[in-house]
Image (cartoon, coloured by chain):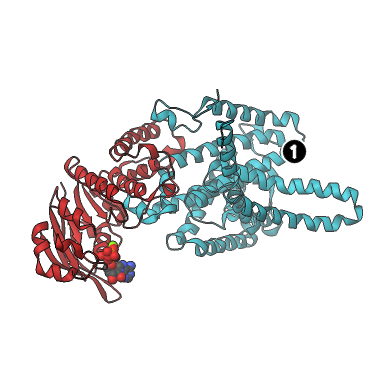
Amino acid sequence: MRGKCGLFFSSYRAEAGLFPSAFQKTCLGLFLAALCACPLVLDTYHVSILNVILIAVIGAAGLNLLTGVCGQISLGHGAFVGVGAYASALATLSGWPFVLSLLAGGLAAAATGMVFGLPSLRLKGIYLAIATLAAQLILEYLFLHATALTGGSNGLALDAPQILGFSFNTDTRIFYLILAVAVAVVLGVANIIRTRPGRAFVAIRDHHLSAEIAGVNLFAGKLSAFGVSAFLAGVAGCLWAHYTMFINPEQFGITLSISYLAMIVIGGLGSVIGAIMGAVFITLLPELLNLASGGLAGLFPDMSASLNALREGVFGLTLILFLIFEPEGLAHRWRLIKAYWKLYPFAH
Amino acid sequence: MANLEVSSLTLTFRGLAALMDVSFIVPEGQIVSLIGPNGAGKTSMLNCISGRYTPDCGQISLDGLDLLRLPAHRRTSLGLSRTFQNIALFKGLSVLDNLMVGRHHLMDTGLLASILYFGPARRKEDAHRLKVEEIIDFLGLSPYRHQIAGRLPYGVQKRVELGRALAAEPRLILLDEPMAGMNLEETEDMARYILDLNEEWAITTLLVEHDMGVVMDISDQVVVLDFGSVLAQGAPGEVQQNPEVVRAYLGSEDSHFLGR
Ligand SMILES: Nc1ncnc2c1ncn2[C@@H]1O[C@H](COP(=O)(O)OP(=O)(O)OP(=O)(O)O)[C@@H](O)[C@H]1O
Ligand SMILES: [Mg+2]
């Protein structure tokens, strides 16, 4: 049933639900079922894109909690993903079961995030951005030069993850593993946002003096935002490492940090759905541009080199156009569309 | 039970004194108003009590407990809450969530419990929601419950801020110019709320306000600050007659109250 002219609740509890209407619950169920069925109809290449998207969703949901919800910008997220990747890879290589490696990757990243989050207690905005950029550079340096641990520029190779003897050694198999983690992360982050810790994060973002008056400990609040956010980055890193089965420092550079920021800005700051939409958009855009430039190169074979260069430019241009015309993110547009259809045909 | 005691408080900014040797008492259950011309140090006084500023010397105690030893966020659980002179809401949160943040110190849901949500975290959210609804009813905020606070009209935002302070279940509330910028009707409503929360909920109140009509009507006592020092204190009638107060206010925008 669709809530045509609005929804009415008979209890506060029903109103506070994540998916307040039966219609929404059904849609979500269908969506998840469709996702689960994807590997049955898609070829391996497309499943691999889905895997990359889901990993990005995990990292972006984490960054959105820190930057969108708590207002603390981080340019070090790519390196936090790297910490999770290396820590979990090392754990797996020394014989730990995958689930423990996943946890280890998350916790190592969380600890790193909290240490590099310390400047946030004194710095804001652009100054915090610079401080976290320093974190990114320091960690990148360590990935490259702590060769005994990370293998330096040679990188680390590892095997597909195993749980209870079952090996997730194909794109399709690992898809279900990544999907399960991503769904858990998305629900967990949504729950944080709608309860006490999440409200405290927003309070810190919107007015830190008032937050203090309400009894929010700014120190603990900011650090835990860094902790949770980096934990999720670490989880994304662990999945990435075990999915690609090869990691090297280049994968966790400043470009990764920036593309995570692009995801949450394009998707919509401060909401879970924004992180999801941004992750989908930023991951798919290069693929679509690839397709387009491939098609054009077929038509004009002698131009393929310049088309490649053009692709990068179009990527940047698309981002800029989005920022100008959709500054509140895709999630906001999505809400407007939903509101429109709810009142249809009486919308004005 | 809340008895605020400020004694010999001095606060300086780079050598300039904002407060000089200020002493006064806010007895339990009373409404005490802190008045004075612009720049007299009223907001600075509230900031010292709530923990935003650290005074150079002097004491502040609540029911005999030394407030100055505690960081701002820990003073809340002693029963202290406040509103700000300029609206200081969480702009991106709904009215409901603004008030729920007010109850932060009364709740104990940690990160893990909140991630799992079902069970204790959910029950606690529901219970606190009921309390918040009481305050929403009291302040007539029901129509705005789910609206984003930053997009509401000014007068409503002022009420939401009062609501957030009340949600913390304070015993002592500090109000910094709650009527500033309000029209006559909104001012009367606000005065009514302050009297009600003082009488029915037994919340001791320290009020900073420029609207002398309101101050003289609802205060049990008035403390007058001028250039950071206490010029006079006592019952509203006495203070109004005090020649020093009359002199301090001459020519200022609040001087009309002298002629009443
Ligand atoms: N953070 C600060 N740094 C420097 N000076 C300050 C600061 N806060 C207040 N002051 C100074 O202290 C004095 C008292 O200011 P305060 O804001 O307490 O006045 P007020 O009585 O609240 O005035 P108003 O009625 O205009 O709100 C002023 O001279 C002000 O310039
Ligand atoms: Mg003031």
Task: Look at the numbered disc 1 and say if its residue's Cβ is closer than 8 Å to ligand 1.
Answer: no
Which image quarter is the C terminus of chain B in? bottom left
Residue lying farthest top? A1
Q: Is residue B180 above or below residue A237?
A: below
Quadrant hosting residue B71? bottom left
Residue closer to the observer: A192 or A344? A344
What is the number of callouts on the image?
A: 1
Q: Position of residue B195 (x, y in %)?
A: 19, 45
In terms of secondary structure, where does tag 1 sit?
helix
Crowding around mark 1 (Cα neighbors within 10 Å: few <14, some 14 to 19, many 20+) is some
Measuring 56% from the left and 37% from the top, which residue is drawn there? A348
Q: Position of residue A291 (x, y in %)?
A: 80, 45
Is residue A56 visible to the viewer in this orientation of the structure?
no
Per the rendering, the colour in which chain B appears is red
Q: Is residue B96 above or below residue A131?
A: above
Q: Is residue A21 left or right of residue B214?
A: right
Q: Quadrant of ligand 2?
A: bottom left
Q: Is residue A321 left or right of residue B133?
A: right
Tell me the subunit letter for badge 1.
A
Residue lying farthest front? B259
Q: Position of residue A157 (x, y in %)?
A: 69, 48
Residue closer to the observer: B206 or A91? B206
Q: Is residue B165 left or right of residue B4?
A: right
Q: Amino acid at mark 1?
A: His
Is residue A183 visible to the viewer in this orientation of the structure?
yes
Residue lying farthest bottom? B15
Per the rendering, the colour in which chain A appears is cyan
Measuring 86% from the left and 54% from the top, which residue is drawn there? A304
Q: Position of residue A78 (x, y in %)?
A: 60, 54
Residue tagged 1: A46
